Image (tube, rainbow, N blue to C red):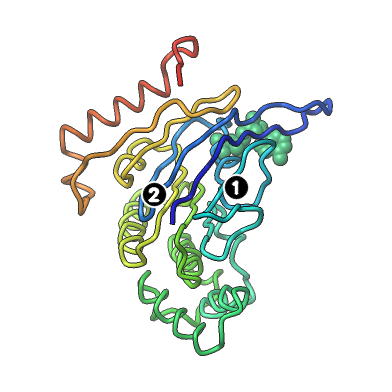
């Protein structure tokens, strides 16, 4: 199913109360099974756009559709993973129960939920620790738990907002490869927000570049690097260096030369 962002914009009230444009009119289509990364500096509207894609925030104008259905609340086939995994898990529930509540929320039967929880834990390599509590685990394991929970509903689309910004470099590389694997296994589209250009190029089929004041899309680049990607080999390819410098220039170029 395509996720269609159709001419959405967002204004928030300023401190004085009048509307301030955070995201100028934006249109983009995320194709079935595509991995689309969104990069841009802090404040350029990445989270705002992602929350509107997920039906968590109403656009000021325009609309979002998943397939032919308008998104006005979080749809059944869509999961969201936030950066703040520590707070997105319930500390009084062990890993298995943290996942099972996603099945309950989706009104799956107990048996179906148990089966999907097992599969999701296996997919992220946490089957051995299902009885641990979040506070007994490292940041990387907590984030894997949050990803596994997102998988329980077998989403068509997974939205991720800077999910690995708070973990160390080695864990981050592991989590990147894990997301590539589960995306393949679950055949879902992923929209992945990051401010890290290398991460965007490494993961994506496409990279959307945004700039601020007000937030807007400046380019939509196809990442023609072969798959499967590899943390060492892919990043050594001349094409990788070329793409990252293209994106860097898109982000840095003077505002007056910006054209849609
Ligand atoms: P990013 O995720 O790229 O850092 P955001 O989408 O969080 O950007 O924010 C875009 C702009 O909208 C920023 O100027 C931010 O200050 C503003 N903004 C975000 N959320 C709100 C809010 N709830 N109320 C007022 N302004 C907001
Ligand atoms: Mg953000």
Q: Nearer the viewer, residue 138 or 150?
A: 150
If the picture is divided into quarters, which one holds ligand 1?
Answer: top right
Q: Residues within 10 Å of mark 2 (few under 14, many from 20)?
A: some
Q: Which residue is outermost to the front? A: 68
132 displayed left or right of 107: left
Q: State the image coordinates of residue 33 (x, y, percent, origin top left).
A: 36, 55
Q: Residues within 10 Å of mark 1 (few under 14, many from 20)?
A: some
Q: State the image coordinates of residue 122 (x, y, percent, origin top left).
A: 36, 76
Q: Nearer the viewer, residue 131 or 177?
A: 177
Relative to 62, is 68 above or below? below
Measured Cα–Cα span from mark 2 to mark 1: 18 Å
Q: Which residue is outermost to the right? A: 16
Q: Is mark 1 within 8 Å of ligand 1?
A: yes
Which element type, helix, strand or loop, lies under badge 1?
A: helix
Which element type, helix, strand or loop, lies under badge 2?
A: loop
Relative to 165, is 174 above or below? below
Quarter of the rendering occupied by the N terminus: bottom left
Q: What residue sits right under mark 1 in the picture? A: 51
Q: Nearer the viewer, residue 194 or 4?
A: 4
């Amino acid at each position: 199913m395509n996720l269609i962002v159709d001419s959405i914009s967002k204004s928030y009230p300023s401190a004085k109360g009048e509307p301030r444009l955070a995201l100028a009119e934006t249109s983009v289509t995320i194709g079935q099974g595509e991995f689309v990364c969104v990069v841009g500096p802090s404040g350029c509207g990445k989270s705002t756009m992602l929350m509107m894609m997920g039906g968590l925030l109403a656009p000021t104008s325009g609309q979002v559709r998943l397939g032919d259905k308008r998104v006005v609340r979080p749809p059944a086939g869509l999961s969201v993973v936030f950066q703040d995994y520590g707070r997105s898990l319930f500390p009084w529930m062990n890993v298995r129960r943290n996942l099972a509540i996603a099945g309950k929320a989706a009104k799956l039967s107990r048996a179906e939920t148990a089966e999907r929880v097992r599969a999701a834990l296996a997919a992220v390599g946490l089957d051995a620790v299902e009885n641990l509590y979040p506070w007994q685990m490292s940041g990387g394991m907590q984030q894997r738990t949050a990803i596994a929970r997102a998988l329980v509903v077998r989403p068509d689309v997974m939205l991720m907002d800077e999910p690995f910004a708070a973990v160390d470099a080695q864990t981050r590389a592991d989590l990147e490869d894990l997301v590539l694997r589960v995306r393949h296994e679950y055949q879902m589209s992923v929209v992945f927000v990051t401010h890290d250009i290398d991460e965007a190029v490494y993961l994506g089929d496409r990279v959307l570049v945004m700039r601020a004041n007000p937030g807007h899309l400046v380019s939509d680049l196809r990442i023609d690097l072969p798959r499967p990607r590899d943390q060492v080999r892919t990043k050594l390819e001349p094409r990788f260096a070329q793409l990252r410098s293209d994106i860097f220039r898109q982000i840095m170029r003077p505002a007056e030369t910006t054209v849609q």
